[in-house]
Image (cartoon, rainbow, N blue to C red):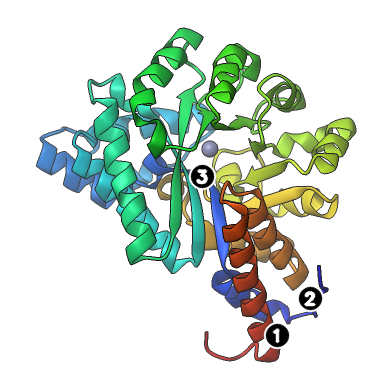
Amino acid sequence: MYTIPSIPADRLPELLRRMPKAELHIHIEGSLEPELMFAMAARNGVKLPYASVDELRRAYAFSNLQSFLDIYYAGASVLLHEQDFFDMAWAYLQRARADNVLRADIFFDPQTHTARGVAMGTVVNGLYRACRQARTELGVDAELILCFLRHLSEAEAFDTLEQALPHRDKFIGVGLDSSEVGHPPEKFARVYAKCRELGLHLVAHAGEEGPPAYVWTALDLLKVERIDHGVQSSKDPALMERLKQDRIALTVCPLSNLKLCVFPKLADHNLKQLLEAGLAVTVNSDDPAYFGGYINDNFVQLHEAVGLTAQHAYQLARNSFEASFAPPELKQRYVERLDAVFARFQQDPTGAP
Ligand SMILES: [Zn+2]
């Protein structure tokens, strides 16, 4: 990898916004903006427990992961028809395009919907149609990752997998999300073994609020290819070494960690420390409608808090492509586009895009 010359700190936000990137940790239900939520509630005749968009936004003052999840599940209740799932994903994909995201590996939570009587096909078909359209109309490559809700049982996860199998060609992997503490990865070891047999990519949330032990079991028992969050890994030097040696990517979400009080201030965030320790760290938005920003907001606010360099920026973008589940020839093309933008920016950091 070449060394990036230094670029003035005040030009970094522009570079961060302009550089091509992949987003690897985005829950599509967490991209549902209050305005769209209220529009869907009206057209579907669903009553929300909030009187207005403003009242809903004011409720977004979270004290921990659970306080967020309670509102998140209430918000998802407006999603009933295939078109609702399409509209939600399409809104996200347009924002991704505007943030120069070339590739998105998108999480969805089918159990949040099937538990309300919405059919698996309604969910998957709406999301998949938006992903296909994004490729041709927006130039964004997007694929779906089905997440199991870890506060539910192993049997319910198996049941969800069964329902999803008729749609096997429309998703590329599985993940594990929702309330982490008290629901260690090993609870789903047999489900993941089955998914591995099916040739699905494997990821899991671990080490967000939970201990480094959860990251170890996600790696050793679930055999995941990436760790979602993983910020607690810095407490365990042996784990840090393992993540580095095996080039296991961490999909870190700075504004989410701030809003859910994983770190008291953004300036306390350990992303730069993890990156400088040689880990394959990436920057992502998690649930952008709830946490106050999309991927570029995460990059820029992190930079303002901890002071990223152009070298950090390049490494973060490059990590995102290399850790994505895109085929090798596409990854190479993404990195070429990244290199081209950096080369142009170095020649003229004040110029127009
Ligand atoms: Zn997440």
Residue type pointed to by label 1: Gln
Callouts 2 and 1 close, C-beta under 8 Å: yes
- Residue that appears at 74% across and 81% down: 7
Task: Determine the image quadrant of residue 237.
Answer: top right
Residue type pointed to by label 2: Ile
Image position, residue 249 (x, y; %): 70, 44
Image position, residue 205 (x, y; %): 60, 31
Q: Residues within 10 Å of mark 1 (few under 14, many from 20)?
A: some
Q: Residues within 10 Å of mark 2 (few under 14, many from 20)?
A: some
Image position, residue 349 (x, y; %): 65, 87
Image position, residue 20 (x, y; %): 57, 68
Q: Secondary structure at mark 3?
A: loop
In this image, 70 relative to 257: left or right? left
The residue sitting at the top extreme is: 155
Q: Which mark is residue 286?
A: 3
* Placement of 279 over or under 122, stated as above or below: below
Q: Which residue is mark 2?
A: 4
* Placement of 204 over or under 305, stated as above or below: above
Q: Secondary structure at mark 2?
A: loop
Front position among marks 3 and 2: 2
Task: Determine the image quadrant of residue 15.
Answer: bottom right
Residue 98 or 254: which is nearer the viewer?
A: 98
Does residue 182 appear in the picture of this structure?
Answer: no
